Amino acid sequence: MNTEIGPPRHSSGAPNATDPVRVMVVDDSAVVRGLITRMLEEDPGFSVVTSVGNGQMALSALERHDIEVVVLDIEMPVMDGLTALPKLLKVDPELQIIMASTLTLKNADITLRALEAGAADCIPKPTSSRDISGTTGSSDFKRELIEKVRGLAAARRRNPRRTARKPGAPPAYPSATTGHAPPPARPTGLYGPRPVVLRAAGIETPDVIAIGSSTGGPQALFTVLGALKAGSLRQPILITQHMPPTFTTILAEHISRCSGWEAAESVDGEVVRGNRIYIAPGDFHMVVEVRGTDKVIRLNKNPPENFCRPSVDPMLRSISAAWGRRVLVVILTGMGSDGMKGGQVVVAGGGTVIAQDEPTSVVWGMPGAVATAGLCSAVLPLPEIPQYILRLASRG
């Protein structure tokens, strides 16, 4: 059954911060639509304005209703999610779209393509009656769903006409070539005033580069690594991106294709080598141990940190212990604060942390956390990050 409620698209105006988030659920399964709707509407902060069964219906509904966030299934009759995605964004370029996908290689590949095409995030949806009936897995799905819908809506409301910085326009923060003067404090909506204080220079040439990312991370990773062509650096790159199993397998393949680097999910016990990219597999923390003269990847299923496994924090703690001062950490777009505590350990050990700036982030949670904690030597627009890495990593 398809349902439509709520205000017409052009009648409600810009929402206040306290207004319920207006959501559309698109899935050909009435059971899944009902599950997602119930989960969201148990919280007064959400209103499911419409619930429809395919992409064509979603387009029609978007023309009639003012929607902020869409939870979009991939496989549907009439019009599937990947086909509907660019059409929905054409109607509303600021629409926040979460792809709901089952954990298959095919759907993981489609989801990565959807993220490249403008979807903001993805979520593995429940696939069985057991999941839907209220098991621990269903509870985890609900927490993740609510967190992502709320975070993306807050990002949209904070800057409802967000656009990329035009070439030649001054950056929001000092660039890699214009010094490190701290920018002024400014409000950021969801988090309140968050002044950014940059650390003084005195940066070591790194022997390892670590990247942490979440919401919007795949797109950001493709931008950064696509500009860091294979052979441009001698250092290994370790990546923790918040993604479920299977999805990280496909992410590694996409990174290899866009960058030419040898990129793969890490394997427990393998020795870290230069000029390679190691990606934390979904549902495993990736850390590094010192074994004689070697640095060795270890994977574990220790409890989630920041509700995440893999989590950025354990990776950062371990590389700080293994490489000391010669660590460069890059925190890209993502919700929450994963990477902040690990970043504190890195900085205390003499390493370097940089972060993506707010205007180019899908969600300025993770990079904002390290930036406002005073951990960063630079806070940069996404297109400037590859050049900063090259400049720092190529010294000496």
Image (cartoon, helix red, strand yellow):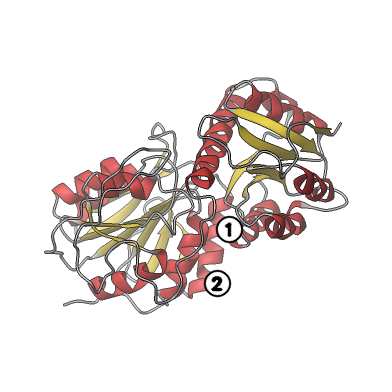
Q: Tell me where residue 13 appears, x and y as whole percent.
A: 63, 41
* Residue found 70% across the figure and 31% down from its top: 48
Q: Nearer the viewer, residue 289 or 225?
A: 225
Number of other residues with Cα within 10 Å of mark 2, as a class: few under 14, some 14 to 19, many 20 or more: some
Q: Residue 124 carries which label?
A: none
* 322 to the left or right of 50: left
Q: Please, is residue 185 above or below residue 391 in the view?
A: above
Instruction: Pick whichever of labels 1 and 2 is earlier in the sequence.
Output: 1
* Residue found 24% across the figure and 44% down from its top: 373
* 115 to the left or right of 279: right
**Residue 282 in view (yes/no):** yes
User: What amino acid is found at the position of numbered circle 2 in the picture?
Assistant: Arg
* 189 to the left or right of 289: right
Q: Which of 244 and 14 is in front in this view?
A: 14
User: What amino acid is found at the position of numbered circle 1 in the picture?
Assistant: Ile
What residue sits right under mark 2 in the picture? Answer: 257
**Quadrant of the rendering where the N terminus is positioned:** top right
* 163 to the left or right of 8: left
**Quadrant of the rendering where the C terminus is positioned:** bottom left
Determine the CA span between mark 1 and mark 2: 11 Å
* Residue found 19% across the figure and 62% down from its top: 181
Quarter assignment of residue 165:
bottom left
What residue sits right under mark 1 in the picture? Answer: 250
Number of other residues with Cα within 10 Å of mark 1, as a class: few under 14, some 14 to 19, many 20 or more: many
